[in-house]
Amino acid sequence: MTELDVAGLQRRLAAFAAARGWEPYHTPKNLAVALSVEASELVEIFQWLTPEESARVMEDPGSAHRVTDEVADVLAYLLQFSEVLGIDVLAALAAKIDRNELRFPVPENKDRHSSE
Amino acid sequence: MTELDVAGLQRRLAAFAAARGWEPYHTPKNLAVALSVEASELVEIFQWLTPEESARVMEDPGSAHRVTDEVADVLAYLLQFSEVLGIDVLAALAAKIDRNELRFPVPENKDRHSSE
Amino acid sequence: MTELDVAGLQRRLAAFAAARGWEPYHTPKNLAVALSVEASELVEIFQWLTPEESARVMEDPGSAHRVTDEVADVLAYLLQFSEVLGIDVLAALAAKIDRNELRFPVPENKDRHSSE
Amino acid sequence: MTELDVAGLQRRLAAFAAARGWEPYHTPKNLAVALSVEASELVEIFQWLTPEESARVMEDPGSAHRVTDEVADVLAYLLQFSEVLGIDVLAALAAKIDRNELRFPVPENKDRHSSE
């Protein structure tokens, strides 16, 4: 049985790293860097695509697999980073959405978002 | 009431973007790029820290807030990216851990991990 | 008088860092990370732009200044990284172009480049 | 004869892209993204290394080659990006160092640099 919730995945990732003796490498700095490296590997898939081509990336099974795999890698490092620092990722995001709802009120003129 | 699960947060993010007319900007390519930009903003906090300093980053309330905020931003774009492409992020990660358990068997000699 | 060649700029950057006691922070790892952080700050300027809008980014003086500034930051870290490791950046690029000319012969069909 | 100066390398890169029909892909946005992807590939080499290990990365011929190759890729995209937008990279960096000399006066207390 696979635990399909964030806390369960974090436990699996922590056990995985511990069993392989990887904990000394998993400093917050290294995990943040690894997260950004994986995010760039995801970007690499899209780098020469037009916006329209990028919207069809899941139609090809090979690139669909690659995209899904990189998404998993990004989430893996995000969850390990958060676990190591004791951050509740879901609560962090909920609080951020709350703040953004105040910061970006629904506009009359909504044709451009500046820096989020 | 805040929905503190991945699917609930994805719904809030989708509604947030729709209400502001941001959907045209949210191509998979742009969302992947935004994810990597946010991951780099997280890295920036750590860029001049030693490994030891990086482990104490949550002790200072200012940097703790900044780290938590960037984690939220990374998760926000990861969830929006996955939503736009129909990827189940938790299932993707569970499947990746399954594969990694075959690919990286628990070693006798566990002093270094190569590329994960 | 400003030394407008790569070696002269590397000397200025090295003197700048030495005068401020920054050398201990300038490990190859930290400089590579700082380079990637600056590259992402450059990307951030473009993240919500269409390809067409991105081609007009220098028309607005504010964004022209910002782009030029980020280009300078990327080059600064690239030169410092290379200096610390004894890499001749111009020779490295010339050698890479030589290799790429063999690796990517001028094609009959030239409508797509895959991974460079 | 190889032209070992920035302008000469930019001419070679422009001719290389033109001969392969790659110009339509070389929007400023795509080139900035490609630059950041290459910067992350450079970072990847260092991601699990300690600061001390990172300082010895050129001792191993394999990793020395890999580092040099990624440096070349970063410079290639930086020069192509700048060429497409008409930015003089060396002048941009010289001007930035001038500004930084005012912004970061040589300190009495020089034990930490904050954000550069």
Image (spheres, coloured by chain):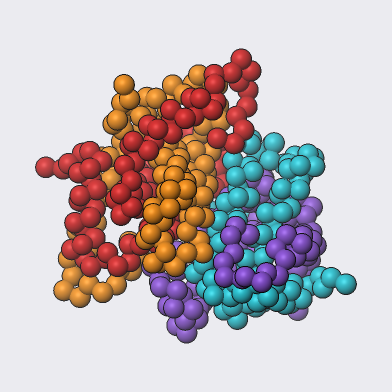
Chain colours: A cyan, B purple, C red, D orange
| Residue A11 left/right relative to D36 | right
Residue C57 appears in the rendering: no
- Residue at position x 59%, y 36% in the image: C115
- Nearest the camera: C27 or B62? C27
- Height in image: B79 above or below D31? below
| Residue at far bottom of view | B59
Where residue D97 sits: x, y (%)? Answer: 24, 51
| Residue at far left of view | C1
Where residue D35 sits: x, y (%)? Answer: 48, 43
| Residue C98 left/right relative to C47 | left
- Nearest the camera: A63 or C85? C85
- Height in image: D82 above or below B89? above
Among the 4 quarters of the image, the one containing residue A22:
bottom right
Q: Quadrant of the N terminus of chain C?
A: top left
- Height in image: B80 above or below A25? above
- Residue at position x 49%, y 69% in the image: A29
- Residue at position x 33%, y 25% in the image: D2
- Residue at position x 20%, y 75% in the image: D109
Among the 4 quarters of the image, the one containing residue A11:
bottom right
| Residue at far right of view | A1
